Image: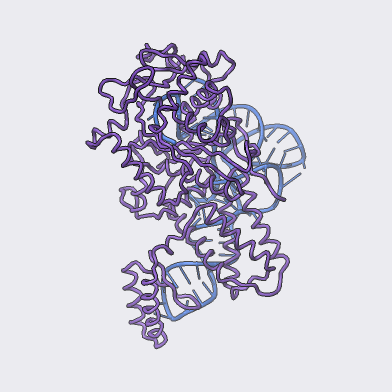
Amino acid sequence: MSSVLQIYNSLARQKEIFDPVNPPYVGLYVCGPTVYNDVHLGNVRTFISFDMVYRYLKYLGYKVRYVRNITDAGHLTNERGEGVNRIESQSQLEKLEPMEIVQKYTVGFHDVCRLFNLHRPTIEPTATGHIIEQIEMAKQLINNGYAYESNGSVYFDVNAYNSHNHNYGKLSGRNTEELIAGYRDLDGQDEKRNAIDFALWKKASPEHIMRWPSPWGEGFPGWHLECSVMSTKYLGTTFDIHGGGMDLKFPHHECEIAQNIGATGTEPVKYWMHTNMLNFNGQKMSKSLGNSILPLELITGNHPLLDKAYSPMTVRLLFLQSHYSSELDITLKGLQDAEKGLRRLLNAAQYLDGLCLSGETNTTTDDELNQLADKCKEVMDDDFNTAKLIATLYEMASRINIFHNDNKKCPVSEPTFTRFRDIFKAFLFEVLGIVNENEATSTDTLDKVMNLVIDIRKTARENKDWPTSDKIRDALKDAKIILKDNKDGTSYEVE
RNA sequence: GGUCGUGUGGCCGAGUGGCUAGGCAGAGCUCUGCAAAAGCUUCUACAGCGGUUCGAAUCCGUUCACGACCUCCA
């Protein structure tokens, strides 16, 4: 009856039973943002997905060390040393020091994380805080014969790596020769032995501000190196789960594997997980395409393509309603649907608290509730199928509503009821990370005022004084407070 | 060109070869002074064409369409 967690491993290209290296401990590493600009919604989708993974692993009882880095070292826009350092170019744009840019957008990123109710990682290391370790790994790769220095820069030697029976490209299904063929017509490869080689350390040009001393002169680390270093420093040479967006599979994660194997000789990651892209109008939402919506724009509704503001929890539910490995096209209709669905689930959660046992047990109902409770774990064990979990929660909500309408009586046994209630709440709040936003907006003061107003209106209604009753209702509606007349009285909700 | 993926009812979105996913919208109903909100019921689809099978949305082949990656991005 009890299922076990299975994870789709991008490296193996199949679902595998999750078998941690060192249970009950689990190491989870997720590639974090480059803090040179506001995070956009696509990043948020990935981080919500892994937040859910982290939450579910904890729910299963694992002790999870969750590492998510901050890339603040200012890498170049491509591996060939062309392009611009994104942090430095942003700093020129905003007339701020590079580290002010880093600070500003790191804080902004954390604000967004809080907004969407993301748990903080247990370690959030920065690339600039691990320059020494990165230099050490580059040295080790040189010593092991997998890297070479060239004109103050250090490059990973892909051919040397492959000739030692390693396979650069195994994660993303690339073929080294074809990659080289694709690069052949590109210029500016003089420093490298091979076009496919990638930078571990780059020599800083004179105008480059973010620079550190190294055995090869002043420079800065290559982008892929920080994740190799920080993941294994905190999680060990082989750890459990490494996650990130699909777009990082190549070259970033491919290079990470090569660096770790080259440095330590061991496979760094047991399970690779990749989240799919967030689309907008059928196209990938991406910084480079310039079609991204910022999280804050969505929350405030301040964007030409939005009809209104959507709450963070609406967005969170919308994202989790599709599987993490599927593409998700964000639309206004989808947001509206999710908004209603969220209300349905939260209403049910509220009704759940008011339910009590009827005293008699209907064995069919009892069984059905237990089956629904079982199903939550079963579907999550199947590669974190949140879409199915949410469908199951809707079914549970439907049951709750029926009981609520039936004098709030549940014809089931006490253990079944307790289990059903605990599981519904645990999966909705702990695992999916949904919070009731309306609860946060209502305060004691407001509650007292509203109770008074509702009481006055109740008297008016009892006297069939409809003008007064409707005036109160309309005026409150202007103030974005919605009155709901139910069978057993009136409640309110802040919009 | 290479690699990978997708095509499900009005819309979104899960689907392990046979058994109702679920949500939104629509329709009907309950509640109600009216309304709103909420709730209940209902609506049965799998791109085309072949094939395997007792049986296919699910496996195989093929055609068409779409997308992602191959260059910085989650």
Quadrant housing residue A288: top left
Q: Pick out the residue farthest to the left.
A: A95
- Residue A133 lies, in percent from the top left, at 44, 27
Question: Is residue A288 found left or right of A182 in the rendered image?
Answer: left
Coloring scheme used: by chain
What is the quadrant of the C terminus of chain A in the image? bottom left
- Residue A300 lies, in percent from the top left, at 33, 53
Question: Is residue A261 found left or right of B71 in the rendered image?
Answer: right
Chain A colour as displayed: purple
At horizontal 57% and vertical 31% (from top left) the residue drawn is A269
At horizontal 47% and vertical 29% (from top left) the residue drawn is A229
Chain B colour as displayed: blue
Residue A375 visible somewhere in the drawing? yes
- Residue A347 lies, in percent from the top left, at 50, 65
At horizontal 38% and vertical 15% (from top left) the residue drawn is A186
At horizontal 42% and vertical 23% (from top left) the residue drawn is A135
